[in-house]
Amino acid sequence: MDEDNRQIRWLLAASAVLGALIIGYNVLFVPQVTLTTIVHTDGSGAASSDLVVSLPGPSEEEYEPEPVEEGLVHLNTADVQELETLPGIGSVTAQRIVEHRNTYGEFQSTEELKQVSGIGEKTFQQIQDLITVD
C-alpha cells in the first residue's frame, strides 16, 4: 500500500510540473490571439460575416504614423496599387517608380520622380499636387 501511495504522489507531482511548464510556455512564448467577428450588411437586410484574427502588435497609442496631407500619395511608401491611382500612371510606370525607389533609395523631392522612365514633364505636371515625399 505504501508503494501505491508513493507512485500516486509521484504521478501527481509530475503532472503538476508538466502543467506548470505548459502554462509557463503559453504565457511566455505564445502570442495572444483574439478573434473578432465583423458583420457586413449591404442595405438589403442581407448580412455576411468575416472572422478577423488580431495578433499582438503596437497599440494605437504606441504607433503614430507620420502626418501626411490627406489624399496625397507618399512616393517613399506607396505600393504599386496606390501609385496607379495617380492620373497618367499605369501599372508599368508604377512598378518602375517602386523599382527606382528600391534601387536608388527614397525620393528626396517630388522633382526626382521625373528621373523614372515614363514620367515626363506633362505627367509630372498632372500629379505634382497629388504626391509628397514628406
Image (tube, grey):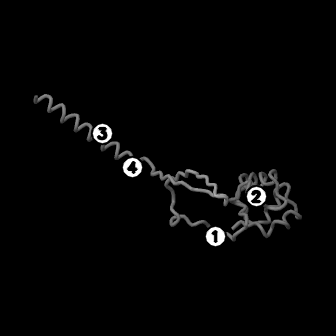
Find residue 75 and name its label.
Answer: none
Q: Secondary structure at mark 3?
A: helix
Is 50 on the left or on the right of 34, as rendered?
A: right
Task: Tell me the CA gap for discs 2 and 3.
Answer: 54 Å
Mark carried by residue 83:
2
Q: Which residue is mark 1?
A: 67
Task: Write down the residue under mark 4.
Answer: 28
The label nearer to you, 3 versus 1, is: 3
Q: Mark 3 highlights which residue? A: 18
Give the foreground label among 3 and 4.
3
Residue at the image position 58 percent from the left and 51 percent from the top? 50
| Farthest left residue in view | 2
What element does badge 2 sit on?
helix
Cα gap from disc 2 to disc 4, whole angstroms: 41 Å
Are there few (<14), some (14-19), or many (20+) residues within 10 Å of tag 2?
A: many
**Callout 1 amino acid:** Pro
Instruction: Point out the tag, 3 or 4, that comes first from the N-terminus.
Output: 3
Q: CA distance from mark 1 to mark 4?
A: 35 Å
Q: Residue at x 37, y 45 (%)?
A: 25
| Disc 1 crowd, CA 10 A, few/some/many (<14, 14-19, 20+) | few
Structural distance between the alpha carbons of marks 3 and 1: 50 Å
Amino acid beneath label 4 = Leu
> Three-letter amino acid code at disc 3?
Leu
Query: Which one is earlier in the sequence, the residue at label 2 or at label 1?
Result: 1
Q: Residue at x 71, y 52 (%)?
A: 102
| Tag 2–tag 3 contact (CB < 8 Å) | no
Q: Check contact, mark 3 vs mark 4: CB within 8 A.
A: no
Of callouts 1 and 4, the N-terminal one: 4
